[in-house]
Image (spheres, rainbow, N blue to C red):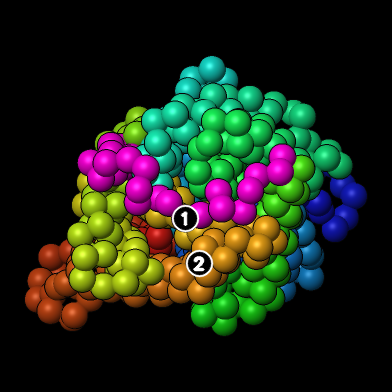
Amino acid sequence: MTNSSENTAGPPRGDEMLVVVAKLGEALDRSSYPVTVIKEILEDITDAYKYDIEAEIFANYLIALDRGNGRVEVSSAGPSYRFDQVDRTEALVRELRAGAIKLDDAATTLDNIANARPPLTIPVRVIGYVFMAMGFAMCFRMSPMATAAAMVIAIPVALIMLSKIGTGRIGPLMPFLLTFLTALALAFWAKHTGTADPVRLAVIPVLTLVPGAAISTSLMELTEGDMTAGASRLIYALVVMLSMAFGLALAIEIAGVPAESLEDLTSNLAPSWVIWLSGPLFGLGAALYFCTPRKVWFWTIFACFGTLMLSQLLDKGVASPYAGGIAMGVNVLFAYFINVRVRSRPSMLMMYLPTFWLMVPGSMGFVAFSGVMTGAQDLSDMTSSAAMALLSMSICMMVGLALAPYLAHPVKRLGLDTRSKSKRREPSTPAQGRSRRIRDETPEPGK
């Protein structure tokens, strides 16, 4: 929600841009954009509308200042947006960059986006979550029985996350509670059936709660110099991961799972060909669960499949953390190119975020922390690999974002555009001229 610094019935004339900046900054933050990208987008929009507004952006709130009249607007971020809300936010950003929408209408649109109901029903989204669990289990190469158990447990987990049970004061405890209850049920089942690797099995039904993407975003922000936002986001993500690892370790201790069962057996439980199915299944499940617009379905599924297969191929020649990082860097380049070249403008975020979750760096850290708490040496030894995977993916994604404009628009970016300026259509207004120049430039990630 956005809170004005003065208690009035509506924003005074001239404050429309201040309200839009605050609300749009909140929407972009809830869409999982790094702080650096949000700043650049807001600067482009205020320049397009000729306003002198400065925004200070943090991990979960934003302060907008209109230096012309000294007014301030503050917004605080809420829960993350679904992908249908992200798509509508990105479409609005394109209109604002072009100066093609009134500011009052933009503010109303942002309110409508924040309050929009999911386009898919709860049963459909639960099916999507089950597909994600199945794809994730196949990525881990779990046994058929363990995969089926994870899919069954994923159903009540999805129902709880899609309901209002996790709101209010209990909300911050949901990662711990859901992990504990899920791990307890699966640990008892694994103990009595002799199923190995119960730690990895337990992470599958709660995979969307593992803050791997938040950790990667924080590392990108820290590398870009956004210390406050990056450090606070990193600390939050680590606390969530530690609380989930504690819940899992507590459940294993209560269930009395023997130490010899706490092993990393991901390559010994299922044939290698199941990995070929994990990407498409996970991508389809993510599209359903997060309400991805249909125009992006194919690209989301293809990105998950292609990136995972590329990682598997690279893994034969380089270490796994580096293979995953290179694959994610290529994924970002691919998502950027598709976003620029395809007429429907598929969102970059919707192509690379599900792929990032599938690549498992967050769950690797979760399993590593759990190994430390349970004393399982095979799992705790994964800590360095998890950290290296996160760093590798974050850095390669940043390299991909830096190279993408030159690959998508090599002529313009390298200064080789020899077209006569006199043949270009002149803008009818300064604002339109600015918007056209912004359009000619490569859009920011996800635009």
Circles 1 and 2: CB distance less than 8 Å? yes
**Residue located 73% across and 54% down the image:** 246
Where is residue 140 drawn, in percent x and y? 40, 47
Q: In which quarter of the image is residue 301?
A: top left
Along the line of sight, the residue nearer the viewer: 41 or 339: 339
Q: Does the magenta stretch include residue 131?
A: no
**Residue located 60% across and 31% down the image:** 192
Q: Give the range drawn in magenta.
A: 255-280
**Residue located 61% across and 36% down the image:** 191
How packed is label 1: few (under 14 Cα within 10 Å), some, or many (20 or more)? some
Q: In this view, does 239 lie to the left or right of 340?
A: right
Residue 125, relative to residue 82: is it above or below? above
Residue indicated by mark 1: 264
Residue indicated by mark 2: 382
Q: Is residue 61 left or right of residue 114?
A: right
Cα distance in 3D space between marks 1 and 2: 9 Å
Along the line of sight, the residue nearer the viewer: 128 or 404: 128
Q: Is residue 233 visible?
A: no
Q: Is mark 1 on a helix, strand or loop?
A: loop
**Tag 2: residue type?**
Met
Where is residue 374 drawn, in percent x and y? 67, 58
**Tag 1: residue type?**
Asp
Q: Is residue 161 left or right of residue 326?
A: right
Q: Is mark 2 on a helix, strand or loop?
A: loop
Residue 398, relative to residue 77: is it above or below? below
